[in-house]
Structure formats: structure tokens, C-alpha cells
Image: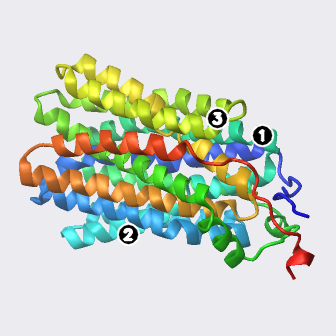
Amino acid sequence: MSQAPASPAPTLSMTQVLLCGALIVTLSMGIRHGFGLWLQPVTMDRGWSRETFAFAIAVQNLMWGATGPFAGMLADRFGAFRVLIAGSLLYALGLVLMGLATSGLAFTGSAGLLLGMAQAGTTYAIVYGVIGRNVAPEKRSWAMGVAAAAGSFGQFLMVPVENWLIAAFGWQEALFVLGCAALAIMPLAFGLKEPKASGNAGSQQSIGQALREAFGYRSFQLLMAGYFVCGFQVVFIGVHMPSYLKDHGLAPQVATYALALIGLFNVFGTYTAGVLGQKMAKRHILAAIYALRSVAIVAFLAVPLTPMSVYVFSAVMGFLWLSTVPPTNATVAQIFGVQYLSMLGGFVFFSHQIGSFLGVWLGGRLYDMTGSYDIVWWLAVALGVAAALVNLPIREQAIQRAPLAATA
């Protein structure tokens, strides 16, 4: 006899969870999405190479991924509230120290290590764990789409604001203002404060058992492989596209509008992916997203580079930007249940961030070596095709487990 993962009874209202969770993701993702706007002012003012800046952001993404599973474990064990409070404080501290850093090492410590840990404690894996435990399975993919769409709206809202802050006050003062904004996550965290027992109610697995089960399951491995490509593509584009456009003679505001358009259209893309995840196989949604990204990049590189071609590419890529997030996390919840959703989501996201590290670092490294981003663009195309293929064999059915008594 076997049994599928069971879901605990909700303890918070869906409206409260979605509202507070969406606002937290709006702030945490919105702030980080504009970091590419700091590349040129920081490197020019400090006399650093682009690789110095890119390496710090690469470390940030890697640190975000590396600490994500541990933040998820803490959230599953002690509640998301405490993790969000710590993450908010780290976010504010990291932004302030990023503005004060005068060496590449200090910049990597603040923009890389501190902000990476802060993002692990304030973004999707933590919020999705609460959503998974407090939203019914038949609405879970949709709810995750709503939260992801909020993060996209944060990008649309915050990128122009950050550009204005840099222009009006200077790049350092702009970071100090954002540090204050990051503290707003703390009061919102109260809306995701679950009763102590909710995370472990009906517990049937230890953390070790959950990890052995997930990492021994082929579909979990394939999800991680696909998410690696997602990270490579979006972080390379998000950080390096402003400089790519400026190198080709386009006005700085073109990059600002491009990043804002990515955020705007991602609102629709992530919501659509969440809705479709309730109606069709999530592996097909993911395969289509990765394949279409490759097609969009090829078309972007093939046509003459103009503001209009940039805006069209940004709209298309924006629709596909974070639309991988709801179906990926909903698949994890569907296969393994929600008891350790934050932790398992953190491990999948770690793979995403390894890809992010390579995308942003190789962008800077290969640019300094060749004076061009062409190699990385085409690498992103090839990886997109590979990701589309590895998602097709994923099995989405709930994993079957032996009853606890029989196992004992």
C-alpha cells in the first residue's frame, strides 16, 4: 500500500497570504532587478573593470542560491516570519555597504555575499512555502502565478524609480534610499506569520528523508537542470543588456525602458503561466518557455538593433522572463507535497543561481576578453534548446510513499 503527499490544513486566509506575499516579492525582486543600472556609474566612479562589478553580482546570485535551501529549511522548521525579518535587515545592510564599498573585495562582500543571503530570505522560496501550505492544491499554481506577477510588477515599478534616484541623487545615495525601502518587508512579514505547529503538522518525513527522496528522483534532477538555464539567461540579460545597448550607441533611456518593459510583460507572463499550470501539463509549459526564449534571442540578434527592436524583444522576453517560476514550484509541490516546499524549492533555485552566476560572470569576463557579448548570447540560445528538451520527460504525478508504519 502507498500514499501520496498530504497537504496540511490552511491556517491563514488566502487573501492575506497573497497580499502580503506579493508585496514582499514586489520589494525584494523589484530592488534587485535594477542592479544593471549601477554597472557603468559604479565602475566609472571607482575605476573598476566591468568584470569586477559582474563578479560581485555573480557572487550575489550564487550566494542567494547557496543559502536558499538553508533559509528554506529554517522557514519550514521555524516559520517564514523569522526568516523574512532577518532577510529584511540583511537587505538594508547590504545596500548601504554596497554604496560605501571602495574596493572590489568590499563590493563583493556587500553586493555579493550580504545581498545574496538577504534575497534568499525574502523571495520566492520563502513566500511560496507559505502559499503552498495555505492555498488549496487546485488554486496553488494560480496563486504562485499571482506572487510571481507581483515580483514582475516590482521590476516594472522599481527600475524607472531606481534610474530616477541615480540621476537625482547619485548612485550611492540611491542605494541608501533603497536600503530604507527594504526595511518595509518587516511589517509585511507579520501577514505570513503561521502558528508554530502548522509547518510540521502531520509530519511523515525527516529533512534527510525528504532530501534523499528528492535528489534520487529523476524528475527533480531534470527540473534543476532546466532552472539552471533560466538563471543563466535572465541574469545575463538583466545585468548586461543596458551596457550592450549603450555599446551599440543607443541612448541610456532605451535600456531603462527595456528593463521596465521586461517587468511589465512579465506580470502577464507569470500570471498566464500560473493559470495554465492549473489546466495543462507543467512540463509542456516549461519546455515551450525555454524554446521560445531561444527563438526570441535569435530574432533579436538577426534584426538591426534599434530602439523598436529592443522594445519588442523586451516585451517578448518579459512575457517569458519569470514565467518558469510558478510551474516549476507548483511541480515540486505536486510531486513531493508542501511540508518541505521552501527547502526543496530552495535547492531547485540553487541550480538557477549557479546558472545566474555563470551568466553574469561570463558576460563580464568574455566582454573584457573579446570586446563583445556575442559568445554569451549564442550560448544562451543553445542552453534554451537544451532546457526545453530536458523538461519534456518530467513526471508530475505525486510521488508514492510507503506508509510510515510499514517503513518503520
Residue 189 in the image, given as x and y percentages of width and height: 67, 57
Q: Is residue 270 above or below residue 335?
A: above
Three-letter code, disc 1: Thr
Three-letter code, disc 2: Leu
Callout 2 crowding tier (Cα within 10 Å): few <14, some 14–19, many ≥20 = many
Callout 1 crowding tier (Cα within 10 Å): few <14, some 14–19, many ≥20 = few
Residue lying furthest top in this view? 308
Could you tell whether 338 is left or right of 125 in the image? right
- Dot 3 and dot 2 residues touching (CB under 8 Å): no
Could you tell whether 319 is left or right of 22 in the image? left
Question: Of tags 3 and 1, which is closer to the observer?
Answer: 3
Q: Residue at x 79, y 46 (%)?
A: 135
Q: Residue at x 13, y 49 (%)?
A: 367
The residue that disc 1 covers is 15
Residue 161 in the image, given as x and y percentages of width and height: 38, 37
First-in-chain label (2 vs 1): 1
Could you tell whether 274 is left or right of 138 in the image? left
Q: Residue at x 7, y 49 (%)?
A: 370
Q: Residue at x 24, y 38 (%)?
A: 242
First-in-chain label (3 vs 2): 2
Three-letter code, disc 3: Gly
Frontmost residue, 67 versus 280:
280
Q: Is residue 93 visible?
A: no
- Dot 3 and dot 1 residues touching (CB under 8 Å): no
Q: Is residue 205 above or below residue 363?
A: below
Frontmost residue, 134 versus 406:
406
Q: Secondary structure at mark 2?
A: helix
Measure the alpha-carbon separation of dots 3 and 2: 31 Å
Colour scheme in use = rainbow
The residue that disc 3 covers is 274
The residue that disc 2 covers is 113
Frontmost residue, 38 versus 170:
38
